[in-house]
Image (spheres, rainbow, N blue to C red):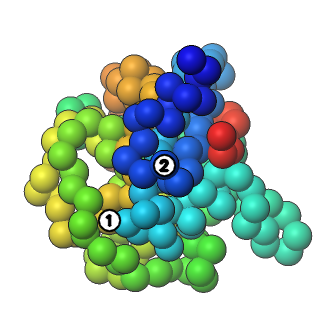
Amino acid sequence: MSDWEKLSEKLRHPDNPIVFFEMAAGGAPIGTIKMELFADVVPKTAENFRQFCTGEYKRDGVPVGYKNSQFHRVIKDFMIQGGDFVNGDGTGMCSIYGTKFQDENFVMKHTEPGMLSMANAGPGTNGCQFFITCAKTDFLDGKHVVFGRVIDGLLTVRKIENVPTGTHNKPSIPIVVEQCGEL
């Protein structure tokens, strides 16, 4: 069985896209995270993330997205947060629909480690920032849109989760998306 067939068997829906992050910590490769995007449930949110993974979204003709962006917030036993390619510190916001977009729905829940969810600053403030859960975080249900899940690479998520942090839960070494795209 091919790698693609093995991944496809894990999908919630056969037409959902699979995207990936090749991760590095302190300049050293630490693994790949492969994620299913729930386009069958939250198509608008999934498409926003997918285009930032592939570089399809362009500003002034230049691809904009997650390549070379950093995970700027890591909280052990909770989540790892990234996606701020605007400012790099958790204050930036951008989406393929403009600055921000509305919560699509809250059908999917934060049921386990590896759930991919939108970071926000309150209702209707979704942009480019996201987080991956490191535990069941059901207290976030109804507040953050779950739009995907890790289907391969949870060990890489765990490596990031265990990086030492400093002020504001910022990793003490750079945690970088060195490459990303769609499979």
Report the quarter where the N terminus lies. Answer: top right
Report which residue position mark 1 lands on: 145
Residue 48 location, quadrant: bottom right
At which x and y percent is residue 178? 68, 34
**What is the spatial separation of the Cα atoms under label 1 and label 2, in whole angstroms?**
21 Å
Residue at image point 45% right, 26% down: 153
Q: In this rendered view, identify the residue nearer to me: 5 or 156.
A: 5
| Sequence-wise first label, 1 or 2 | 2
- Which part of the image, by quadrant, shows the C terminus? top right
The residue that disc 2 covers is 14
Residue 143 visible in the picture: yes
**Residue type at numbered disc 2:** Pro
Q: Which mark is residue 132?
A: none
Q: Residue furthest right?
A: 61
Whether residue 83 is visible: no
Residue 136, how many percent across, how many down? 16, 42
Give amino acid for label 1: Val
Residue sitting at 50 percent across and 36 percent down?
8
Q: Is residue 111 above or below residue 84?
A: above
Q: Nearer the viewer, mark 1 or mark 2?
A: 2
Mark 1 Cα within 10 Å, few/some/many (few <14, many 20+)?
many
Asked if the residues shown at circle 1 and circle 2 are in contact, with their CB atoms under 8 angstroms apart, the answer is no
Determine the image quadrant of residue 4. top right
Q: Seen in the image, is 73 located left or right of residue 67?
A: left
- Residue sitting nearer the eye, 5 or 45: 5
Which of the pair 83/92 is nearer the observer?
83
Q: Is residue 66 left or right of residue 63?
A: left
Residue at disc 1, secondary structure = loop
Counting from the top left corner in percent of width and height, residue 172 is at: 45, 29
Q: Is residue 142 above or below residue 140?
A: below
Residue at screen point 32% across, 58% down: 146
